Protein backbone atom coordinates (compact mmCIF):
# COMPACT_ATOMS: atom_id res chain seq x y z
CA UNK A 1 0.00 0.00 0.00
CA UNK A 2 1.14 3.55 -0.62
CA UNK A 3 1.54 5.93 2.31
CA UNK A 4 -1.59 7.77 1.16
CA UNK A 5 -3.59 4.51 1.15
CA UNK A 6 -2.24 3.68 4.62
CA UNK A 7 -3.01 7.21 5.85
CA UNK A 8 -6.61 6.95 4.67
CA UNK A 9 -6.94 3.46 6.16
CA UNK A 10 -5.54 4.61 9.52
CA UNK A 11 -7.61 7.81 9.59
CA UNK A 12 -4.91 10.49 9.80
CA UNK A 13 -5.64 13.83 8.17
CA UNK A 14 -2.15 13.73 6.62
CA UNK A 15 -4.00 12.11 3.70
CA UNK A 16 -7.36 13.41 2.55
CA UNK A 17 -7.91 16.81 4.14
CA UNK A 18 -4.17 17.53 3.86
CA UNK A 19 -1.95 16.26 1.05
CA UNK A 20 1.16 15.51 3.03
CA UNK A 21 1.52 11.76 2.49
CA UNK A 22 2.54 12.04 -1.17
CA UNK A 23 5.39 14.36 -0.13
CA UNK A 24 6.37 12.13 2.77
CA UNK A 25 6.40 9.09 0.52
CA UNK A 26 8.88 10.82 -1.77
CA UNK A 27 11.15 12.09 1.02
CA UNK A 28 10.90 9.13 3.41
CA UNK A 29 10.41 6.24 0.94
CA UNK A 30 14.07 5.17 1.03
CA UNK A 31 13.63 4.29 4.72
CA UNK A 32 10.77 1.88 4.20
CA UNK A 33 12.85 -1.27 4.86
CA UNK A 34 15.32 0.36 7.24
CA UNK A 35 15.60 -0.04 11.01
CA UNK A 36 15.50 3.50 12.41
CA UNK A 37 13.57 5.70 14.83
CA UNK A 38 10.89 8.25 13.99
CA UNK A 39 9.55 10.78 16.51
CA UNK A 40 6.24 12.51 15.94
CA UNK A 41 5.05 15.41 18.11
CA UNK A 42 1.24 15.27 18.32
CA UNK A 43 -0.48 11.89 18.51
CA UNK A 44 -3.96 13.21 17.76
CA UNK A 45 -7.43 13.07 19.20
CA UNK A 46 -6.84 16.01 21.53
CA UNK A 47 -8.67 15.54 24.84
CA UNK A 48 -11.19 13.08 23.43
CA UNK A 49 -11.05 9.83 25.37
CA UNK A 50 -9.53 6.93 23.44
CA UNK A 51 -8.95 8.98 20.28
CA UNK A 52 -5.67 9.43 18.43
CA UNK A 53 -2.72 7.39 17.23
CA UNK A 54 -3.72 7.33 13.55
CA UNK A 55 -0.45 8.63 12.18
CA UNK A 56 1.72 6.54 14.52
CA UNK A 57 -0.08 3.43 13.24
CA UNK A 58 0.35 4.62 9.66
CA UNK A 59 4.11 5.08 10.15
CA UNK A 60 4.39 1.66 11.78
CA UNK A 61 2.68 -0.01 8.82
CA UNK A 62 4.68 1.94 6.23
CA UNK A 63 8.08 1.51 7.89
CA UNK A 64 8.38 -2.20 8.45
CA UNK A 65 11.33 -2.07 10.87
CA UNK A 66 11.09 1.40 12.43
CA UNK A 67 10.55 2.29 16.07
CA UNK A 68 7.77 4.90 16.16
CA UNK A 69 7.80 7.33 19.08
CA UNK A 70 4.98 9.78 19.80
CA UNK A 71 4.69 12.74 22.17
CA UNK A 72 1.44 14.42 23.14
CA UNK A 73 0.43 16.83 25.87
CA UNK A 74 -2.55 14.54 26.56
CA UNK A 75 -2.12 11.01 27.92
CA UNK A 76 -2.15 8.75 24.84
CA UNK A 77 -0.63 5.69 26.51
CA UNK A 78 -3.42 3.50 25.08
CA UNK A 79 -1.72 3.91 21.66
CA UNK A 80 1.34 1.99 22.90
CA UNK A 81 1.92 -1.18 20.85
CA UNK A 82 4.85 -3.22 19.56
CA UNK A 83 7.23 -0.70 17.91
CA UNK A 84 5.03 2.23 19.06
CA UNK A 85 6.25 4.16 22.13
CA UNK A 86 4.24 6.96 23.69
CA UNK A 87 5.27 9.88 25.90
CA UNK A 88 3.15 12.55 27.54
CA UNK A 89 4.27 16.15 27.88
CA UNK A 90 4.65 19.56 26.31
CA UNK A 91 6.58 19.91 23.08
CA UNK A 92 8.38 22.94 24.54
CA UNK A 93 9.71 21.04 27.56
CA UNK A 94 13.40 20.88 26.71
CA UNK A 95 14.31 18.41 29.46
CA UNK A 96 11.56 16.03 28.31
CA UNK A 97 12.61 16.28 24.65
CA UNK A 98 16.20 15.51 25.63
CA UNK A 99 15.07 12.53 27.73
CA UNK A 100 13.07 11.14 24.81
CA UNK A 101 16.07 11.41 22.48
CA UNK A 102 18.33 9.85 25.14
CA UNK A 103 15.91 6.95 25.53
CA UNK A 104 15.15 6.28 21.86
CA UNK A 105 17.89 8.01 19.87
CA UNK A 106 19.44 8.38 17.46
CA UNK A 107 16.31 9.79 15.81
CA UNK A 108 16.40 9.87 12.01
CA UNK A 109 12.98 11.42 11.35
CA UNK A 110 11.14 14.08 13.38
CA UNK A 111 7.65 15.32 12.51
CA UNK A 112 6.14 18.28 14.35
CA UNK A 113 2.37 17.87 14.17
CA UNK A 114 1.70 19.21 17.67
CA UNK A 115 0.14 22.51 18.65
CA UNK A 116 1.24 24.27 15.41
CA UNK A 117 1.67 27.47 17.42
CA UNK A 118 4.75 29.22 16.03
CA UNK A 119 6.37 29.84 19.41
CA UNK A 120 6.05 26.11 20.20
CA UNK A 121 7.20 24.98 16.75
CA UNK A 122 10.25 27.25 16.90
CA UNK A 123 11.19 26.14 20.42
CA UNK A 124 10.80 22.45 19.56
CA UNK A 125 12.96 22.96 16.47
CA UNK A 126 15.60 24.83 18.50
CA UNK A 127 15.91 21.88 20.87
CA UNK A 128 15.39 18.93 18.55
CA UNK A 129 17.13 19.87 15.31
CA UNK A 130 20.61 19.70 16.87
CA UNK A 131 19.67 16.29 18.32
CA UNK A 132 18.49 14.89 14.96
CA UNK A 133 20.83 12.28 13.46
CA UNK A 134 23.18 13.35 10.69
CA UNK A 135 21.35 12.77 7.41
CA UNK A 136 18.03 12.94 9.24
CA UNK A 137 14.80 14.61 8.12
CA UNK A 138 12.71 17.15 10.05
CA UNK A 139 9.15 17.99 9.01
CA UNK A 140 6.91 20.78 10.24
CA UNK A 141 3.20 20.47 9.45
CA UNK A 142 0.43 23.04 9.27
CA UNK A 143 2.67 26.06 8.80
CA UNK A 144 -0.47 28.06 7.89
CA UNK A 145 -0.77 28.89 11.60
CA UNK A 146 1.97 31.44 10.84
CA UNK A 147 -0.66 33.64 9.19
CA UNK A 148 -3.35 33.26 11.86
CA UNK A 149 -3.18 35.46 14.99
CA UNK A 150 -5.54 33.22 16.94
CA UNK A 151 -2.97 30.40 16.48
CA UNK A 152 -0.07 32.61 17.58
CA UNK A 153 0.72 33.72 14.04
CA UNK A 154 0.46 37.13 12.41
CA UNK A 155 -1.19 38.83 9.45
CA UNK A 156 2.16 40.59 8.93
CA UNK A 157 4.07 38.28 6.58
CA UNK A 158 7.34 39.93 7.67
CA UNK A 159 6.69 39.11 11.34
CA UNK A 160 9.94 37.51 12.51
CA UNK A 161 8.35 35.27 15.14
CA UNK A 162 6.32 32.90 12.97
CA UNK A 163 7.13 29.41 11.74
CA UNK A 164 7.36 30.69 8.17
CA UNK A 165 9.84 33.35 9.32
CA UNK A 166 11.98 30.52 10.69
CA UNK A 167 11.66 28.71 7.35
CA UNK A 168 12.65 31.82 5.39
CA UNK A 169 15.69 32.31 7.67
CA UNK A 170 16.68 28.70 7.08
CA UNK A 171 16.46 29.24 3.31
CA UNK A 172 18.83 32.20 3.64
CA UNK A 173 21.08 30.06 5.82
CA UNK A 174 21.47 27.52 3.02
CA UNK A 175 23.41 30.27 1.22
CA UNK A 176 25.36 31.68 4.17
CA UNK A 177 28.71 31.30 2.38
CA UNK A 178 27.47 33.90 -0.11
CA UNK A 179 26.79 36.58 2.56
CA UNK A 180 29.05 39.63 2.30
CA UNK A 181 28.65 40.58 5.97
CA UNK A 182 32.03 41.25 7.53
CA UNK A 183 32.90 38.51 10.05
CA UNK A 184 29.56 36.67 9.69
CA UNK A 185 29.54 33.65 12.01
CA UNK A 186 27.42 30.81 10.59
CA UNK A 187 24.77 29.47 12.94
CA UNK A 188 24.20 25.80 13.73
CA UNK A 189 21.37 25.64 11.21
CA UNK A 190 23.43 27.47 8.55
CA UNK A 191 26.00 24.70 8.91
CA UNK A 192 23.60 21.76 9.16
CA UNK A 193 20.53 22.36 6.99
CA UNK A 194 21.40 21.01 3.55
CA UNK A 195 17.96 20.81 1.91
CA UNK A 196 14.66 22.52 2.48
CA UNK A 197 11.47 21.50 0.68
CA UNK A 198 8.46 23.75 1.13
CA UNK A 199 4.95 22.65 0.17
CA UNK A 200 1.51 24.00 0.93
CA UNK A 201 1.48 24.02 4.76
CA UNK A 202 4.36 21.53 5.02
CA UNK A 203 8.12 21.94 5.22
CA UNK A 204 10.64 19.10 5.15
CA UNK A 205 14.30 19.72 5.73
CA UNK A 206 17.38 17.56 5.73
CA UNK A 207 20.30 17.65 8.13
CA UNK A 208 23.87 17.27 6.98
CA UNK A 209 26.99 19.34 6.46
CA UNK A 210 26.46 22.57 4.54
CA UNK A 211 29.97 23.49 3.56
CA UNK A 212 29.87 23.84 -0.21
CA UNK A 213 32.42 26.21 -1.65
CA UNK A 214 31.58 29.64 -3.07
CA UNK A 215 32.72 31.80 -5.95
CA UNK A 216 31.74 34.86 -3.87
CA UNK A 217 35.14 36.50 -3.49
CA UNK A 218 35.97 36.19 -7.19
CA UNK A 219 32.56 37.26 -8.50
CA UNK A 220 31.00 39.52 -5.86
CA UNK A 221 34.20 40.89 -4.33
CA UNK A 222 34.59 41.64 -0.65
CA UNK A 223 32.29 44.66 -0.47
CA UNK A 224 30.57 44.93 -3.83
CA UNK A 225 26.84 45.60 -3.74
CA UNK A 226 24.48 42.87 -4.95
CA UNK A 227 23.65 45.01 -8.01
CA UNK A 228 27.20 44.61 -9.42
CA UNK A 229 26.95 44.03 -13.14
CA UNK A 230 28.86 40.75 -13.66
CA UNK A 231 26.66 37.67 -13.90
CA UNK A 232 27.00 35.07 -11.10
CA UNK A 233 28.10 32.39 -13.58
CA UNK A 234 31.52 31.85 -12.07
CA UNK A 235 33.20 32.93 -15.33
CA UNK A 236 34.97 36.10 -16.24
C1 LIG B 1 -3.15 17.53 14.77
S1 LIG B 1 -3.14 16.52 16.20
C2 LIG B 1 -1.98 15.27 15.73
C3 LIG B 1 -2.52 14.35 14.67
C4 LIG B 1 -1.69 13.12 14.41
N1 LIG B 1 -0.29 13.42 14.26
C5 LIG B 1 -2.19 12.46 13.14
O1 LIG B 1 -1.73 12.83 12.03
O2 LIG B 1 -3.04 11.56 13.25
C6 LIG B 1 -2.27 17.53 17.32
C7 LIG B 1 -1.98 16.89 18.66
O3 LIG B 1 -1.01 17.72 19.31
C8 LIG B 1 -1.25 17.70 20.69
N2 LIG B 1 -0.67 18.90 21.29
C9 LIG B 1 -1.19 20.15 21.35
N3 LIG B 1 -0.36 20.98 21.98
C10 LIG B 1 0.73 20.25 22.33
C11 LIG B 1 1.93 20.55 23.03
N4 LIG B 1 2.19 21.79 23.48
N5 LIG B 1 2.83 19.55 23.22
C12 LIG B 1 2.57 18.29 22.76
N6 LIG B 1 1.43 17.95 22.10
C13 LIG B 1 0.53 18.91 21.88
C14 LIG B 1 -2.78 17.64 20.81
O4 LIG B 1 -3.17 17.07 22.04
C15 LIG B 1 -3.17 16.79 19.59
O5 LIG B 1 -3.38 15.44 19.97
Image (cartoon, rainbow, N blue to C red):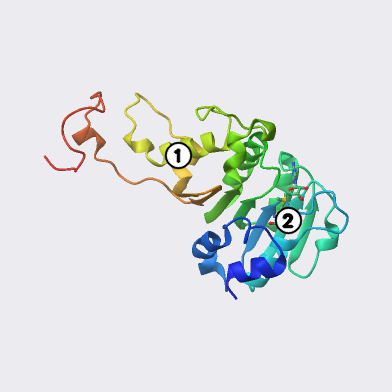
Mark 1 or mark 2: whose residue is earlier in sequence:
2
x%, y% of residue 176?
Answer: 38, 36
Mark 2 residue CB less than 8 A from any atom of ligand 1: yes
- Say if 49 sits above or below 126 in the image: below
The residue lying toward the viewer, choosing from 138 and 58, is 58
Image quarter hosting the C terminus: top left
Residue 31: x %, y % from top left: 55, 68
Give the vertical position of 145 relative to 2 (above or below).
Answer: above
Which residue shows up at 50% across the image and 61% down it?
27
The answer, for residue 122, to whether it is visible in the render is: yes
Q: Report the number of discs.
A: 2
Camera-side mark, 1 or 2 = 2
Quadrant (top left/top right/bottom left/bottom right) for the N terminus: bottom right
In the rendered image, the residue lying farthest to the right is 49
Query: Percent x, y for residue 228?
Result: 19, 28
Few, some or many residues within 10 Å of mark 1 (<14, 14–19, 20+):
many
Q: In front here: 8 or 224? A: 8
Task: Write down the residue under mark 2.
Answer: 70
Q: Nearer the viewer, residue 178 or 232?
A: 232
| 192 in relation to 17, above or below | above
**Residue 123: % across, % down:** 64, 37
| Residue annotated with mark 1 | 190
Residue 108 figure quarter: bottom right
Q: Residue at x 57, y 58 (%)?
A: 19
Q: Quadrant of residue 222?
A: top left
- Which structural element holds mark 1? helix
State the separation of the CA atoms marked 1 and 2: 28 Å
Q: Secondary structure at mark 2?
A: strand
Amino acid sequence: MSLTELGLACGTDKAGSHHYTRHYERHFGHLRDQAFTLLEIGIGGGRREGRGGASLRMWKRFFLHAQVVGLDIVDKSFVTAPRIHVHQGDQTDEALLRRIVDEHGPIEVIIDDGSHRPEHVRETFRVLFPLLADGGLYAIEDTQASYWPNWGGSTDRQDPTTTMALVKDLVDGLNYVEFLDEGYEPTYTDLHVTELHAYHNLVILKKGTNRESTNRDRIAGQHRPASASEPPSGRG
